[in-house]
Amino acid sequence: MSSETVLICGGAGYIGSALVFRLLKETDFKIKVFDNLSYGGDSVFSFFNFPERFEFVKGDVRTFDFDQLLKGVDYVVNLTALVGEPICKKFPKEAKEINFDSNIRLARACEKNGIKRFVFTSTCSNYGLNETGEMIKEDGELQPISLYAETKVDSEKILLNELPDLPCTVLRFATAYGMAARIRFDLLLHELIRDAWTKAKIYVFGAQSWRPMVHVDDIARGIMLVLSKSDSIKKKDVFNVGSNDQNFQKVQLAQMIAERFNVIIEETQAVKDPRNYKVNFDKVTNELGYKPIHSAKESIDQIANALETGLIDDRILHESVNVKQN
């Protein structure tokens, strides 16, 4: 059994729970999850069936002693964040503290403690508005237009340029979707599905705007690739994570959902979508051998079935983000 340990900060969340599941199932890593359980702990219950390989630590990333947390840890994946524009706009102070200040404090502690690799989970929304119509590569211009993206871009700059002794891989994920132990409905595809289910109509603003999409399980697989290739990849690098064939216009997603639920689409001009970007994912494919295996249509069917059979109830559909104060 591997004696190496991966610390996953935010490991009880949407992406984190999917990642922990795969790591426990497919690798020999020992896993330490750090989370404040803003959404409860249901997503990690089954992981305690691996008592020799799984450890859970509850705490607030803003105040926790990272030197203590990092004892015996080899790799760190930081998923901790207030995710998305609405929640960051609602709690701007907490967004900066969690997404930027605490992330950099953690990274500095990782450098000090000799962590073998720090994986920072960023976002393709850093690209903001791209009116050229071309697919953006990793060296493309970053144009954050939300506080959420600003915290990610600011973090990237320090991680890549100011911590010379910290091996760091930045992963800019496409917009996530798909079933997971801690499913969220504040994601683009899921919001459209929720409208179809609860309102029998899909409301779309900025219908022609482009978004890259990626399944949560494929996000987990991308992180695992970085961990498995840590010794052979560059000390510092950036990868877009997704696939070229999953760049969609929002109306295309709405059409797939409308067909599955037999509802109509209503395009609204009252709200303009400031984000519009197509992303190139050749680098992660060519250098890491990454290839997503899930599709948006597959996930629409899965979530629809979960709704129709009652596996997803109203509480989950309308769950809001909690920002816990210690």
Image: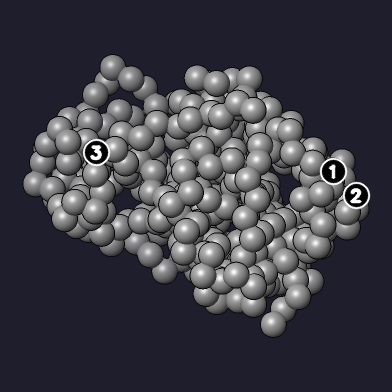
Helix, strand or loop under label 1: helix
Q: Nearer the viewer, mark 1 or mark 3?
A: 3
**Which of the marked residues, 3 or 2, is nearer the chain's N terminus?**
2
Alpha carbon of mark 1 to alpha carbon of mark 3: how far?
A: 41 Å
Label 2, on which residue?
112
x then y, percent, for residue 181? 41, 56
Lateral position of residue 211 relative to residue 268, left or right:
right
Identify residue type, mark 1: Arg
Labels 3, 2: front one: 3
Classed neighbour count for the residue bearing mark 1: other residues with Cα under 10 Å, few (<14), some (14–19), many (≥20): some
Image coords of residue 155 (percent x, y): 72, 37
Question: Label 3, on which residue?
Answer: 314
Name above or below for residue 107 compared with residue 2: above
**What residue appears at the point 52 percent right and 74 percent down from the top-left corner?**
25
Q: Which residue is mark 1?
A: 108
Left or right of 257: which side holds 87? right
Q: Crowdedness of circle 3 by 10 Å Cα count: few (<14), some, many (20+)? A: few
Q: Secondary structure at mark 3?
A: helix
Residue at position x 35%, y 56% from top? 179
Who is closer to the viewer here, 284 or 148?
148
The answer to which of 87 and 326 lies nearer the viewer is 326
Residue found at x 24% / y 53%: 311
Chain-order first, disc 1 or disc 3 = 1
For residue 122, which quarter of the picture?
top right
Q: Position of residue 191 (x, y in %)?
A: 31, 38
Percent from the top left, x then y, of residue 254?
24, 43
| Badge 3 vs badge 2, beta-carbon distance below 8 Å | no
Is residue 84 something one can see in this rendering?
yes
Indicate the amino acid at tag 3.
Asp
> Whole-Å distance between the Cαs marked 3 and 2?
45 Å
In this orientation, does residue 201 appear?
no
